[in-house]
Image: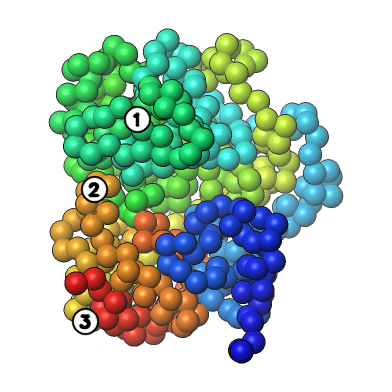
Amino acid sequence: MGEVSGNDAAFARASRIIPGGVSSPVRAFGSVGGSPVFIARAAGPYVYDVDGREYVDLVGSWGPALLGHAHPEVVAAVQAAAARGLSFGAPTLAEAELAEAVRARVPLARKVRLVSTGTEACMTAVRLARGATGRDLLVKFAGCYHGHSDALLAAAGSGLATGGLPGSAGVTAAATAQTIVLPYNHADAIRALFAERGDEIAAVITEPAAANMGIVPPGPGFNAVLREVTAAHGALLIYDEVLTGFRVSASGWWGLEGGVEPDLFTFGKVVGGGMPLAALGGRADLMDLLAPLGPVYQAGTLSGNPLATAAGIATLRLADASVYARVDAAADRLAGEVTAAFTSAGVPHVLQRAGSLFSVFLGVDSPVRDYASAQRQDTGAFRAFFHAMLDAGVALPPSAYEAWFVSAAHDDAVLDRIVTALPSAATAAGAARST
């Protein structure tokens, strides 16, 4: 028998005590097969596994590593905060400073509440919308992920609006009965629903550029339609920018898009600089409905944790125009090289972008505009591509339904390593294509 790798041994050890061996399901490599890579450390554009092997990283902790991993100034800010105390259960000025930094970038977020996770932010935004409107119904879109709170784990409907069906064991039908799922990018469906039930709907929650079914940008005018119909019927519009916020521009997707004014935003990932922190923000009259001022309850012992706020403040301070320019340039080059590699290998594909975020759908030859069309991709071909890239020292997101993340640390030399790996990996994908 061959020697067991450190990753295999680590996975076996973790599996004996942690369900599935991981603390979040996508890390288990379930959709690509094999044992997950256990990371020991990271620096800049690289991660290093427990065997000491170096990988060019295109996961970026699922978005927060905008500056690259372990940026010295962010690390120093966290170390200084840790020396002052890990958690107080009391307010700190750092919370106000980070909230002010969020509002400076997204002025529509007149007031901001800090929480610990994107799930909490979205759950609270929905509760706030229901409290503000006195209505019960929530509208979400198939393929958009807003965390794992019960009401937002409604399974995708197809075609016309459907009553929500639980997407997880343990989620009751009652918990999702007031969630309506519509197909993303279908303006007629949202108009028809509001024409029939508009006075019952508290809010529409959307990823303004979908990034959890692969990258599916909004069609022209789709977000404007959401604003139009919600405003006409007294419902709220919630932009879930947990992934896109402060990632695709200094002001997130809202800053790139222009013209649409949501009532509430949720933020995560970059806003915490890699630490457990998220936020919701929006109109002051709505936000003031949160306890202790108003009747909508939300609380958290670790909300606004001083280490997390230190990381977030440092990250937003450092993420200036030059950082976004470098990230955009890296995404431009890499997206072009990925397309060229698959074209050369004769693999049908569509690469889609939302600012610097992108993903590739293999085995399809027309734009992906909703979850149903995303599901037509060839995940077997992606599996082969993923492992070929991993073997070549490039760590991709371990799912065909995830975005790829570059950072300001992905310079030309780093990108050259990825480009070198692409042709043989694209060929492997072609050989594995479903027939």
Q: Would you place residue 121 above or below residue 416 in this image? A: above
Give the residue type that dot 1 points to: Gly
Residues packed near mark 3 inside 10 Å, few (<14), some (14 to 19) or many (20 plus): few
SS class, disc 3: helix
SS class, disc 1: loop
Quarter in which the N terminus is drawn:
bottom right
- Residue 245 x, y percent position in the rendering: 45, 44
Task: Read off the residue under disc 1.
Answer: 164
Q: Residue furthest front?
A: 1
Q: Earlier in the sequence, mark 3 or mark 2?
A: 3
Q: Are marks 1 and 3 in contact (CB under 8 Å)?
A: no
Task: Read off the residue under disc 3.
Answer: 344
SS class, disc 2: helix
Residue 223: in sight, yes or no?
no
Task: Read off the residue under disc 2.
Answer: 372
Q: Separation of disc 1 and disc 2 at Cα?
A: 16 Å
Camera-side residue: 371 or 125? 371
Residue in the picture at 46% in, 83% down:
392
Q: Would you place residue 50 above or below residue 332 in this image? A: below
